[in-house]
Image: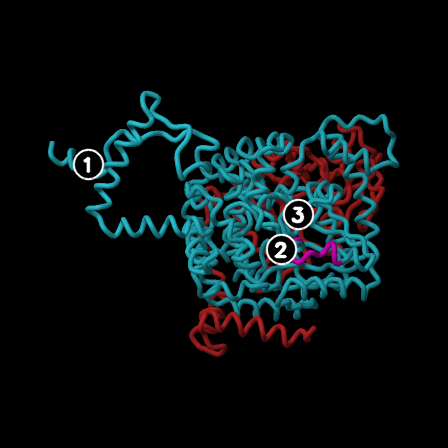
Chain colours: A cyan, B red
């Protein structure tokens, strides 16, 4: 997928003036935020589990090489294959090759962000293999030719009316006069259409929420059951996972399962949490004959040992997106690549470079809600700050900003002068604002006052008021 | 494209370089081997610790909270009749598909004369499947299903209606308790091909976050708890 993160500002402006999108985005704070809060409150041990979740992942990352080796050994023991891919392109080529070798014509797919990251659908289509997304949200956006705008609700940016129009446009074999006004009828129609696809598919591809080193198991969670039909009906099951998905034991996976659904949708556990180990066994009447796991690095190994290592704890629950005022305002597509919201703002520059994605860590108010709700306690704001520093060091920040900061630094290093100047400025601004107490125009800050008024200072600086307080 | 072994070495090498560690550092190898072998529990929520009776009660309540339905029977011989009644109640055909689980084989199917019982994997036309759960978990109202000819995995997902039988003694408090049972049956570090944790019927919130049941998997999930009078002590 060609990133458009560079034009984040233009993307965001477009998103803000898109009425359909704005209506759809209202559902984000309405639904997810309250559900998560209720679920967290209902489990007294939730905060303790978050601490342990962080420890599980920290421990695993410190021993990542060994846990990957242990995982691989168990997969092979169970009769499966492990494929290693250093880059997105390698992973895509690998999967396409696996499908071609099996003469696959149709491939069903469970929801996978790694699939987006490696651009798998385009890769398959190029070789005339039809990828069919089976998660309802993914199916909808596949019809629309879009990419997911949310980690767990890929079609959160689409309204019911748009979906109805899409279904009428694509499902032309169905009677035109059918009623599709209710979500239930839309769900039912997708169910009927996809049912045959599951049965016809030659290969089923899923992602993985966790890999378990102890048993060589891949784990997926879904609410629809689409991931399961995807992986049990075709002859070949391919799992796409990035290397940081591994955890040591079933116990560790259980702790993370308790955190994942509560943080994502406010459920105690997703409807279907499925543990898959190898291909079907002797005597098994169903299940795939082949089981492959593709382990993708794509820049992650270089994050270890850096200030971004903690980002690899992320379990893709989407809580940071749901609680982010920037995400709530512009949605996921504005971020211009696969991952959006605060986690995307940190991860994307790691994966495609700060030159491409430098805008993203700047698209934050640093309100800190993302870190507050992150089940893995990832210090997202701190990491966005790291990116801003790197961007500055690399001289990628615009000239005006650099110059402004330089001027400010010159004054800040001369405290007496700085205080005198600010007290003078505070009085001047107060006088200029007059009775209104705010300004509609301000030299050097035209960008700021373009959308809102500038509130005038009260006439004294903080330091002056602090001194007066001491004197009382 | 380089071969798999080369790429593997590249990735593992990069990880070791970034972490600044050696491949054969004994202390790291021991730490990892111990952790995998000990599989120590993390915090298990208090609500997941209870007697069999408490587990059964909590399991039923939580299963119902996620749109499953539950009924309790006292003897295995009641089960075929209970299934026939359920089908009647929902206007479903008196026709089920089940696996070859010995506990299901043994049931007096003849007692429900109207019921047509097919055995094997799910077919596209099957409307109702019957399975026996390997175990269950009270803390979230979750069924633990294991694959095999006893209870083929396709029965859990393909038909629109899924009926599951579970013995009350198999209802554990926590996921960890259930894993201990899996280990006792399959061996340490071993798993059946598929373990499905199922908590309620299939659902989606993908259309404007409104929850709809029966997205791809079963629209209805009905659990029959076999709770023998003297077993819940």
Which residue is farthest front?
A443
Q: Is residue A142 left or right of residue A329?
A: right
Q: What subunit carries mark 2?
A: A
- The image shows residue A279, relative to residue B205, as above or below, that is below
Q: Please give the residue where the numbered disc 1 appears in the rendered image.
A: A464
Q: Secondary structure at mark 1?
A: helix
Tell us which disc is closer to us: 2 or 3: 2
- The residue positioned 81% from the left and 66% from the top of the image is A101
Which residue lies most toward the top here? Answer: A435
Residue occupied by mark 2: A208
The residue sitting at the left extreme is: A471
Would residue A147 appear left or right of A369 to someone viewing this image? right
Q: Which mark is residue B38?
A: none
Q: Quadrant of the N terminus of chain B?
A: bottom right
Which residue is at a point 53% across and 56% down the rendered structure image?
A349
Give the residues in magenta. A116-123
- Residue A270 in the image: above or below residue B82: below
In the image, is residue A121 part of the stretch drawn in magenta? yes
**Mark 3 neighbour density, 10 Å: few (under 14) some (14–19) many (20 or more):** many
Q: Nearer the viewer, residue A89 or A429?
A: A429
**Crowding at mark 1 (Cα within 10 Å: few <14, some 14-19, many 20+):** few
Q: Are marks 2 and 3 on the same chain?
A: no
**Residue A293 on image: x %, y %:** 67, 63
According to the picture, the residue beneath numbered tag 3 turns out to be B133
Observer-nearest of B134 and A174: A174
> Is A60 drawn above or below residue B68 in the view shown?
below
């Amino acid at each position: 997928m060609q990133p458009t993160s560079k034009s984040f500002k233009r993307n965001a402006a477009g998103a803000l003036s898109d009425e359909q999108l704005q209506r759809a985005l209202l559902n984000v704070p309405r639904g997810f935020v309250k559900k998560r809060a209720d679920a967290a409150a209902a489990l007294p041990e939730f905060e303790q589990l978050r601490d342990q979740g962080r420890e599980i992942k920290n421990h695993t990352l410190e021993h990542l090489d060994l846990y990957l080796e242990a995982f691989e050994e168990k997969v092979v023991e169970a009769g499966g294959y492990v494929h290693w891919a250093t880059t997105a392109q390698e992973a895509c080529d690998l999967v396409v090759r696996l499908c071609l070798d099996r003469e696959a014509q149709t491939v069903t797919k469970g929801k996978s962000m790694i699939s987006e990251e490696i651009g798998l659908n385009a890769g398959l289509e190029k070789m005339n293999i039809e990828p069919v997304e089976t998660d309802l949200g993914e199916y909808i956006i596949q019809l629309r030719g879009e990419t997911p705008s949310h980690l767990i609700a890929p079609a959160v940016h689409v309204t019911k009316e748009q979906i109805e129009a899409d279904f009428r446009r694509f499902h032309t074999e169905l009677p035109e006069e059918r009623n599709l006004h209710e979500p239930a009828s839309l769900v039912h129609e997708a169910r009927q259409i996809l049912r045959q696809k599951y049965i016809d598919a030659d290969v089923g591809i899923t992602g993985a929420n966790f890999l378990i080193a102890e048993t060589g198991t891949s784990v997926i969670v879904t609410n629809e059951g689409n991931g399961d039909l995807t992986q049990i009906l075709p002859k070949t099951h391919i799992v796409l996972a990035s290397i940081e998905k591994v955890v040591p034991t079933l116990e560790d996976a259980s702790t993370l399962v308790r955190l994942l659904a509560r943080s994502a949708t406010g459920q105690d556990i997703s409807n279907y949490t499925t543990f898959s180990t190898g291909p079907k066994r002797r005597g098994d009447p169903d299940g795939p004959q082949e089981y492959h796991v593709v382990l993708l690095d794509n820049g992650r190994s270089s994050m270890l040992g850096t200030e971004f290592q903690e980002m690899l704890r992320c379990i893709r629950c989407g809580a940071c997106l749901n609680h982010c005022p920037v995400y709530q305002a512009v949605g996921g597509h504005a971020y211009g690549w696969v991952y959006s919201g605060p986690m995307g703002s940190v991860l994307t520059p790691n994966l495609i470079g700060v030159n491409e994605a430098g805008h993203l860590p700047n698209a934050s108010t640093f309100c800190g809600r993302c870190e507050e709700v992150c089940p893995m306690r990832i210090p997202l704001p701190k990491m966005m700050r790291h990116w801003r520093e790197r961007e500055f060091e690399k001289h990628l920040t615009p000239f005006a900003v650099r110059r402004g900061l330089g001027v400010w630094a010159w004054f800040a290093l001369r405290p007496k002068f700085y205080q005198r100047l600010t007290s003078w400025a505070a009085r001047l601004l107060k006088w200029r604002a007059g009775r209104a107490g705010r300004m509609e125009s301000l030299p050097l800050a035209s960008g700021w006052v373009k959308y809102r008024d500038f509130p005038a200072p009260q006439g004294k600086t903080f330091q002056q008021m602090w001194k007066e307080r001491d004197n009382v | 494209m380089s071969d798999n072994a080369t790429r593997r070495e590249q990735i593992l090498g990069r990880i070791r370089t970034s972490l600044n560690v050696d491949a054969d550092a004994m202390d790291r190898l021991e730490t990892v081997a111990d952790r995998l072998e000990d599989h120590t529990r993390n915090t298990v929520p208090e609500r997941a610790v209870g007697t069999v009776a408490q587990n059964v009660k909590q399991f039923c309540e939580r299963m119902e909270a996620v749109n499953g339905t539950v009924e309790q029977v006292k003897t295995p011989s009641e089960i075929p009749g209970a299934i026939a009644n359920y089908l009647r109640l929902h206007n479903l055909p008196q026709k089920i598909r089940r696996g070859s689980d010995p506990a299901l084989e043994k049931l007096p199917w003849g007692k429900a004369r109207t019921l047509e019982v097919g055995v094997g994997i799910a077919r596209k036309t099957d409307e109702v499947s019957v399975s026996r759960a390997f175990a269950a978990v009270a803390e979230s109202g979750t069924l633990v299903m294991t694959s095999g000819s006893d209870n083929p995995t396709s029965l859990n997902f393909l038909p629109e209606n899924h009926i599951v039988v579970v013995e009350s003694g198999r209802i554990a408090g926590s996921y960890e308790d259930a894993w201990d049972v899996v280990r006792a049956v399959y061996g340490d570090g071993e798993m059946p091909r598929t373990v499905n944790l199922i908590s309620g019927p299939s659902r989606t919130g993908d259309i404007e976050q409104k929850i709809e049941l029966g997205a791809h998997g079963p629209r209805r999930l009905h659990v029959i708890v076999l709770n023998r009078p003297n077993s819940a002590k």
